[in-house]
Image (cartoon, rainbow, N blue to C red):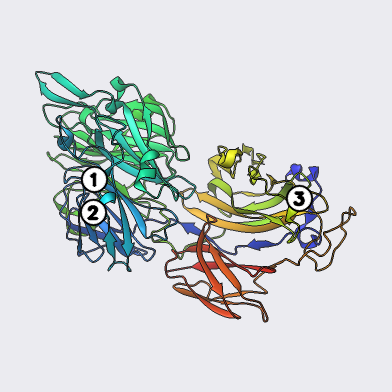
Amino acid sequence: MKNKNLTQRKFIPVKQAKHCIMITMFLLLGFCMNAQNGRWYFGTNGGMSFTNTGVVPLAGSVMNQSEGCASIVDANNNIVMYTNGITIWNGAHLNQGYTLSGAASTTQSAVIVPIPQTGCRSYYIFTVAAAETNYGTTNNRRGLRVSLANVTGVAPNCTVTITAGNLDVNTMAGAFPNNLVAEKLCAVSDGSGGYRVLTHGLGLYQSYSGGTFNTPINTGGEASFYGVHVTAANNTIAALSASLSVNTFPSGQHRSTIIGGGVYSGQGQMKFNSFGTMIGCAMTGTREVQLYDFNPGTGAVSNQILLPTAFTIAGDNLTYGVEFSANGNYMYVSTTFGAINGVFQLDVTSNNAATISASKTQVGFAAGSGYYYGALQIGPDDQIYVARPSTNMLDVITSPNQLACAYVVNGVTISGTCNLGLPSVLRNSQCEGNLYSDCVCDASTDLTEMSWLDANGVTTLGISLNSATAVKKIKITLVNYNQLTIPGCEVCNAPVVNTYGTITNNPIIGGTPSVLSAATNPGGASFSREVIWSFTTPQVVSQLVALTFQFPPAGGRNCPNGAEFCLKIEYWDEDCRVCENALYIVVGDGINWLRQAPSTDETGATGATGAESKTIQNSSEQMHVFPNPAANSVTIQMPTGTENGTVKVYDSFGKLVLEQVVTGATNVLNTESLPAGLYSVRYANGKNQYVNTLMISK
């Protein structure tokens, strides 16, 4: 049904828009994006590989690790490097010669995060030490540690290089006197091309006897989360450390005590949900789980929910593993080292401690004593894998998105032996392979109507959203925005430094209002570039909505301006897989300045005399890109007689990922470094621009 807001402004049907500067590029395919590491190394020579037909053993690992570890792959799912937080190996299992400050008995010893806009060639390797390493008054391994690693060559036979000044640096040095952090370490996408890395403070005491804790050495850290922000700008350790943020809660509610004289303080996994909006912490020392809300855009931790009674079970079993279902509705927790061990499901949708605790259901059960269950880790197939120490088998939660989930004992066989740990995996990493690169969904997005870009820089677009299947969220993001002016007329359109593209309204879909992303302030100007609909009950969406955009106003009506931009449209299905569409749009203010000669529009306004021609074409007719889909190379064929220019390739986030000067009508681009995904290919030579779509499938 047509949104009635569309009648409030003059619209021009797209096929009849002859006088507005508007060309659209419709992406014909949307694909289910579930980019994640498809190869894991862990335990004692343990390994497993995810394929489209199932999980198979993966041999070759030389690692011997009791608990936490990390690995990362390239776009072809070849291992770039893996680590136990102490040693780094490349994908060919060669020791790269560096020593880090993780530990064999750290729950989450390491996580590897790519630095944006480095071509997947630079990575931060984060580590935290074990609680027993931090226990005491002196050591040299405290704090959230980071190493900046550069990778050369092609995985798996690549080389990892870390310079002396970038090796094992404490990001907290000088800022926090005790520098004590727990064995918790995780990372998540910030939704804008960067990543948030989070660790937990640690409260420790020098001695414990007779039920009394003596001589506290860190009474404040136990109440805090410490986070850093990995962005293209924070590409040095100094800049990364400067981004360090702290969120503090009442220490009495947050303390992980030392139980029975053992050093359980700070142990247990900490995980983000798939959206980066919630944190779950298994607090081993107190046999409890804690929940927090998280804002991936700002890094803020809030809304502490304590579950101190949910795991009061007979025996001395300890909470250890934690993981969320892909849809975010359920949290799973493992307990270990007790007479009764188990894996439990909790419904976290209520946001209420009593209700969440009451929802606890045991899905995995073991009567054996000792370390029976270990870490939990969601895979790229959205199933949750359960570590089983001293075996070559993992248990599997095969339907974690359901209340009545299926639990399979000894569900997969691995190479080597599993211990307590599974690898820390960064979901939705732009540098890693996509297990479902051949998965195509039917969602589509079309631009049906639009208004002129008026003198105040305002335009409204009619966008038809069609999800095809039930979705729980739709997000539209304004990316790759540029202001346009007629060549030779820039004096009339002086740059407006503090004005940016902005979505300004909140359309409604099926009774659900949209929410604009929090405004950001580059250069002092506030703008929102994302609008999101979150449906309480997943629904099929087929609706025309009106989105209003504010762009810089024209400098003078005799010298019109325009804007070119991309819209990325994401449909999140019930399993939280994402289908992406995109639109490329160029809009002007009603004056047809695309023509060779001056012209007059319907209002009588005159274009600039002698303005240079600038044409923007849909290259499905003018510029040919083949093969499409492509893998490691693609041929760009320009129209006959086209002058030399530059080809630029942008990813679905609007980031420039490839640029090449071209000469002649036919040119070959090397796309070997591009991960599987959907890209915009643009050619410009000063007078003409051509745009086309490219799919990379590997």
Given residues 464 and 393, the one toward you in this image is: 464
The answer to which image quadrant residue 618 occupies is bottom right
**Discs 3, 1 touching: Cβ within 8 Å:** no
**Discs 2, 3 touching: Cβ within 8 Å:** no
For label 2, the crowd category at 10 Å Cα-Cα, with few meaning under 14, some 14 to 19 and many 20 or more, is many
**Residue 42, can we see it?**
yes
The answer to which image quadrant residue 23 occupies is bottom right
The residue that disc 2 covers is 83
Q: Is residue 93 left or right of residue 668?
A: left
The residue that disc 1 covers is 109
Q: Residue at x 29, y 20 (%)?
A: 252
Q: Residue at x 21, y 45 (%)?
A: 102
Instruction: Please tell me whether mark 1 sits on a helix, a strand or a loop.
Output: loop
Instruction: Please tell me whether mark 2 sits on a helix, a strand or a loop.
Output: strand
Disc on the earlier residue, 2 or 3: 2
Q: Is residue 459 left or right of residue 93?
A: right
The residue that disc 3 covers is 453
The amino acid beneath tag 3 is Leu
Depicted 608 relative to depicted 131: above or below: below
Return the x and y of residue 294 as percentages of the image width and height.
Answer: 43, 35
Instruction: Please tell me whether mark 3 sits on a helix, a strand or a loop.
Output: loop
The amino acid beneath tag 1 is Ser
Disc on the earlier residue, 3 or 1: 1
Mark pair 2, 1: CA separation = 9 Å
